[in-house]
Image (cartoon, rainbow, N blue to C red):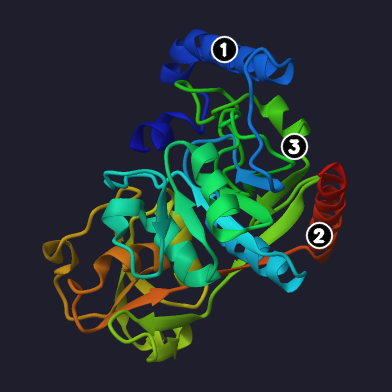
């Protein structure tokens, strides 16, 4: 991600040099999508409606909090939702694999464990999303499946596509890999059902904001503190996510003085990584906390965030989900 952060969000010599390769990459992506649309390459349904929550750029844009909120909405509407994920970085020997709140994140991935803790619904991971989604339907009886990422995994037939865009970094220099951060050309956003702007929204996008003003103690989550209470001292801010600066900025909005410690996304923490100079509190993301329990100092906290969505989007997604569920019920 360092390469893309440095070169993928501006027009510079390196990006211009790589532009022809990006054009070729974008053309190949278009061809692949065209072949799936025309049925030359086959996609596969799983027996239940599938909602894809993804993005067209490399790195995090806020998909996981959005998935958690969607699962909550669907559950409140009477569905039995389940979550399917790639399980990025997971080292499990057999796939697909069920995930629980106590699963080892190094076997199944950190984000799936976070979702299992948050959503309290079936979560299944695997490189083959079709097989994972099928397991949710056949084993757990899920009647609505939400895919955390997978917008480009066209073999999994989808009924609703939601693309999340970073409201501030946007699409960088608008180039596909390797000159820019995009997995697909910007025109792909016109083909999805909904576009969510994380932090800021433009035009036809729906706004999503991430809210979180409370820190929980890493070893005992029953102990909590408002972020405002940490204004009295400097804190070590730890973030092993794709955009750690977003987390640091979130803390600064509460007036905290930070010593920043950015780590690579999905970083495998060890005890020594959390040994800092100065006996200050450590604040980290919820995703990092999944991997730091048992190796963290006593004064270590994490900050969970919740997605606050545009009410109109929530109304529209439930309406569209109901129509799709009804049409599939009639077909069967």
**Residue 260: in sight, yes or no?**
no
Pointer 2 local density, CA inside 10 Å: few below 14, some 14–19, many at least 20: some
- When the figure is inspected, residue 309 is found, relative to residue 95, above or below; the finding is below
Find numbered disc 3 in the image and state the secondary structure of the residue it sits on. loop
Looking at the image, which residue is at 68% across and 59% down? 208
Q: Which residue is mark 3?
A: 192
Q: Which residue is mark 2?
A: 318
Say which mark, if any, is on residue 28: 1
How far apart are labels 3 and 2 at the CA level? Answer: 16 Å
Callout count: 3
How far apart are labels 2 and 1 at the CA level? Answer: 34 Å
Camera-near label (3 vs 2) is 2
Camera-near label (2 vs 1) is 2
Q: Quadrant of the N terminus?
A: top left
The image shows residue 300 at horizontal and vertical percentages of 27, 79
Q: Answer whether labels 3 and 2 touch (C-beta < 8 Å).
A: no
């Amino acid at each position: 991600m360092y390469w893309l952060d440095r070169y993928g969000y501006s027009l510079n010599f390196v990006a211009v040099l790589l532009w022809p390769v990006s054009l070729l990459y974008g053309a190949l992506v278009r061809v692949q999508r065209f072949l799936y649309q025309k049925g030359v390459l086959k996609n596969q349904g799983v027996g239940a409606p599938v909602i894809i929550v993804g993005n067209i750029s490399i790195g995090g844009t806020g998909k996981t909090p959005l998935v958690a909120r969607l699962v909550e909405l669907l559950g409140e509407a009477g569905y039995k939702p389940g979550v399917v994920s790639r399980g990025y970085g997971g080292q499990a020997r057999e796939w697909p694999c069920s995930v629980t709140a106590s699963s080892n994140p190094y076997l199944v991935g950190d984000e799936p464990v976070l979702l299992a803790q948050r959503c309290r619904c079936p979560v299944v991971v695997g490189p083959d999303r079709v097989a994972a989604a099928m397991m949710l339907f056949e084993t757990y009886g899920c009647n609505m499946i939400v895919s955390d990422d997978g917008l480009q995994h066209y073999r999994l037939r989808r009924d609703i596509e939601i693309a999340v865009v970073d409201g501030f970094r946007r699409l960088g220099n608008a180039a596909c890999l390797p000159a820019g951060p995009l997995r697909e050309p910007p025109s792909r956003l016109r083909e999805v059902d909904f576009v969510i702007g994380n932090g800021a929204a433009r035009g036809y996008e729906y706004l999503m904001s991430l809210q979180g003003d409370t820190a929980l103690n890493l070893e005992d989550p029953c102990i909590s503190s408002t972020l405002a209470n940490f204004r009295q001292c400097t804190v070590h801010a730890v973030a092993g996510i794709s955009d750690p600066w977003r987390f640091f900025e979130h803390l600064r909005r509460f007036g905290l003085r930070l010593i920043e410690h950015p780590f690579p996304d999905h970083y495998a923490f060890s005890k020594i990584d959390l040994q800092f100079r100065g006996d200050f509190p450590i604040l980290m993301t919820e995703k990092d906390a999944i991997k730091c329990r048992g190796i963290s100092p006593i004064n270590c906290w994490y900050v969970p965030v919740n997605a606050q969505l545009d009410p109109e989007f929530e109304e529209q997604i439930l309406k569209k989900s109901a129509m799709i569920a009804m049409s599939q019920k009639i077909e069967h």
